[in-house]
Amino acid sequence: MGSFNKYIFPLFFLLACRSPNTISPTQHNKGDSSIAKNLALGDIRNINGATEEALRLFLTAHQEAENDTFFLEHGIASIKIGEVLYDRGSYDSALTWFFHARDLAATYHLRPVEAYAQYYIGKFNETKGAFSQASRYYDSSLVISRQDDDSSLLALALTSRGKNYISEGKLNLALQNYLEAFQITESLHDTLIFAQTCSHLGSLYMLLHQYDKALDYSRKGLLFRGDMNNPEGIAKSCNNVGIIFHKLNRNDSAFSYFYQALTLCRNTHYEKGMVKAMNNIGSLFSEQNDDQKAARYLDTAFSISTRTGYGFGIATSSLNLGDLSRKKNQLAKAIYYYRLSLSRIDKTDYDEMLDNIYQGLFQCYDSIGDYRTALDYHVLLLQTQKKLLNTENARQLAQMNIAFDLERKEKDNQVLRADNELKELLIKRKTTFIWLIVIALGFTIALCAAVYNRLHIKKKANSQLETLNRTVTEQNTALNKLYSIIAHELRNPLYWFQNLSEALSRKYREMPPRKSAKKPLSPGRIR
């Protein structure tokens, strides 16, 4: 995944969407490259925790764009400046810049700038506890990002809208938003937004008491932020992981992650993160009855929040200090801190914090005998608890819906698995049958080949035998003919000699001695 995509991708997307009707070619060539360079360098510095330098670069880009009437870059720089101030906790100053960007977008028809401005104004309202107003701005940003196919902004808006749904108790809708954002960021290969989405999913699964999934997603967010060297993001993830371990009663691990977050924030001068980490550490020490350490961390968190004007940090630190003071029976001090916390979040939708504040004030005034004031806060407590009950009912209903969906999906998966197993069995049987056919066919082919080969050899041998017989017959015929000729040639002379011999034999006695040259036999000689 890309290292700096959260900021640089939207920047170049916005630059690519420059309207030719608002900026002339001459203006574009004059100083646009310098502005884009400052914006890009500011993004990188902001990611790496060098927020002062990032703010300086964004202000320089803003001034250049304003002087050269680069309206699009002017709007982008305004959003970037507001983003840095927002992350610092200077929400009111940030809102001024977001409104400025929105006005530019409306005047010069810069839809991408308008979408990001609406998104950040929604975040401001959410931070201030105006959840219903925040949802309207988020929805407006979602509409534009879907229409313009801006996937990066869509993922950001979905996660923020999901967080907004959680405050309304609509956990099922929050989960839908988070999962859609997760799928988008996976396809975008945008590491920063992917890490942010994982962090939100971890927080949601923690509310659903699915702590294994909560840890899994939170650690994924921590891993990706660590790979990017994004210290502020790492600190946020460490705080989230520490909270999950606290829920699991693994306080040693929780302390470890809270301290890691605090160290990173100190090194990068991220004071908003320091306040959150110190409040977490102080609350954990208070639960372990180490009130001295708890007070030290909570007092420091309160001092930083007050110095920087971080309103929500003041409210949180004051509430924790009020609980600690009431625990130590320092009721006047506890009332002071409770009322200070209330002044920061009164008329907001932070009902859980309001419930704790009203509960603390009721008990303090009841303890000191101021029953009229105690009654007033008790009435407010009941009203808040009624709202919380409605929210809790919505959460439980959402949890039931999620559980039902999961159960249905599991049943569907079981049916699919059974169907797949049946299909696999049929495939195995078909495969076995096919192999048997192949083997039988192969055997048949081999047998036929053997028979054919044998017949071929036999036919060849018969052919050779016939040729040999024909040769022998021809040789016998020739030999007989030869014998016949020889016999004929021999028979004629012999026949002549035979006739002569027979004639001589027949005429021999009749022939006179003179012709036969026959001599008389000597006396006494026997013939």
Image: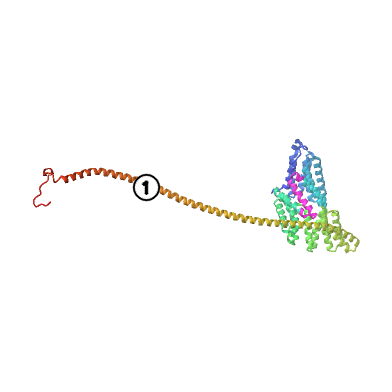
Element under label 1? helix
Q: Is residue 508 left or right of residue 267?
A: left
**Camera-side residue: 456 or 273?**
456
Q: Is residue 64 visible?
A: no
**Percent x, y of residue 260:** 74, 56
Residue 438 versus residue 39: which sits nearer the camera? 438
Q: Nearer the viewer, residue 120 or 41?
A: 120
Is 158 within the magenta?
A: yes
> Which contiguous range is marked in magenta?
144-173
Horizontal and vertical percent position of residue 10? 74, 45
Could you tell me residue 328's position as x and y percent? 83, 63
Q: Quadrant of residue 503?
A: top left
Q: Is residue 264 magenta?
A: no
Q: Nearer the viewer, residue 333 or 527?
A: 527
Majority SS type along the magenta span: helix
**Viewer can see residue 466:** yes
- For disc 1, the marked residue is 469
